[in-house]
Image: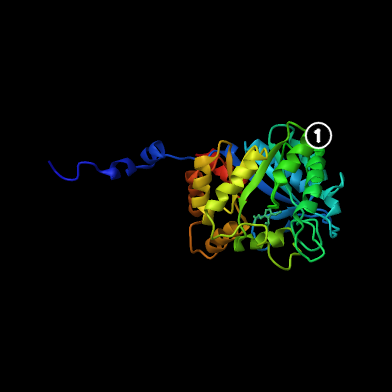
Amino acid sequence: MTFPVQRPRRLRTNPAMRRMVAEYRVHPAELILPAFIREDISQPNPISSMPGVVQHTSDSLKKAAAQAAELGLGGIMLFGIPAQRDATGTASLDPNGVLNKAIRDVRSEVGDTLVVMSDLCLDEFTDHGHCGVLADDGTVDNDATLDIYAQMGVAQAEAGAHVVAPSGMMDGQVGVIRAALDAAGAQDVSVLAYAAKYASAFYGPFREAVDSQLAGDRRTYQMDSANRREAILEVELDLAEGADMVMVKPAMSYLDILADVADMSPVPVAAYQISGEYAMIEAAAANGWINRRAAIEESVTSIKRAGANLILTYWATELATWLKEK
Ligand code: PBG
């Protein structure tokens, strides 16, 4: 008998064999496209640190949503950039504010063929750029923020969101939003909780994408990257408060967290491949340092392999196009 008998290379001999034995594959229906809509522009506005991503006008957003539906994506996650900001983010509650209007526009474009999700957070709407309102001492006031989040949830549901996605990491946010939705008769609107959201340097390009006014950081409300166990606590609290789905964010530097959450969660688990993850790969590829498509596919597969059921990625549309070719 020659040695070795077991030769793993046999199952790697050609593309058809490798495809057949692949343990994980990505499907368009589990991809969610994050999209930005800006109030005061007449042409889509490129985001320099996210080549290929734009701030949409309402026309270009509707087209992007229609294309996403056409390609069979799972959903779209909307972020609004208002023309006017103030200390409490009042534009977030205006039924005709940029985000609520975009939700309505996208819903009328795609109906129920694409899941319409909205970011539920104040950072795009406040003039100080924090995810909540500030107390007199300048700290983010958790409970005063909850009152506004509850109203935002109702406004977004009334605009037609299938799913609202609180991303501000205020304690108790899922519970108050769920209660407000139920009281408003929006029992069928789901909550996707940004449960384990870490304070990350990789959000950098997003700050340009939403023209963020933030001067400091979010370390008093977003999680510390040094903590792993705490992610389970955050997920358990959100589940107890009624989260229908939970998210880990960012994705690539937090695959261990994603695997932990995937292990224990009884509800679907989403992971957000964020702006900085996108920018790094685009920048390296633009320099000819890595193969762009291979790097994108490998990165998204790694998120799937770690346990994500849903993946938010700025490449969602392009990935779905590639998946169709195969
Ligand atoms: C907060 C929010 C952020 C992102 C999504 N929702 C920014 C932050 O927490 O600082 C980041 C997304 C990305 O970087 O792609 N509304």
Asked whether 48 or 243 is in front, the reply is 243
Q: Residue at x 71, y 62 (%)?
A: 208
Amino acid, disc 1: Ala
**Residue 254 vertical position relative to residue 30 in the rendered view, above or below:** below
| Side of 209 where 95 appears, left or right | right
> If the picture is divided into quarters, which one holds ligand 1?
bottom right
Residue 285: horizontal and vertical position, in percent?
A: 53, 61
Label 1 crowd bin: few (<14), some (14–19), many (20+), radius 10 Å: few
Rendering quarter of residue 44: bottom right
**Residue 117 vertical position relative to residue 212 in the rendered view, above or below:** above
Rendering quarter of residue 308: top right
| Side of 151 where 272 appears, left or right | left
Hey, which residue is sitting farthest bottom in the picture?
A: 215
Residue 46: horizontal and vertical position, in percent?
A: 71, 59
In the rendered image, is residue 236 in sight?
Answer: yes
Residue 12: horizontal and vertical position, in percent?
A: 33, 44
Residue 104: horizontal and vertical position, in percent?
A: 81, 40
**Residue 324 vertical position relative to residue 88 in the rendered view, above or below:** above
Q: Residue at x 82, y 62 (%)?
A: 127
In the rendered image, is residue 312 in sight?
Answer: no
Is label 1 in a helix, a strand or a loop?
Answer: helix
Rendering quarter of residue 13: top left
**Disc 1 target residue:** 183
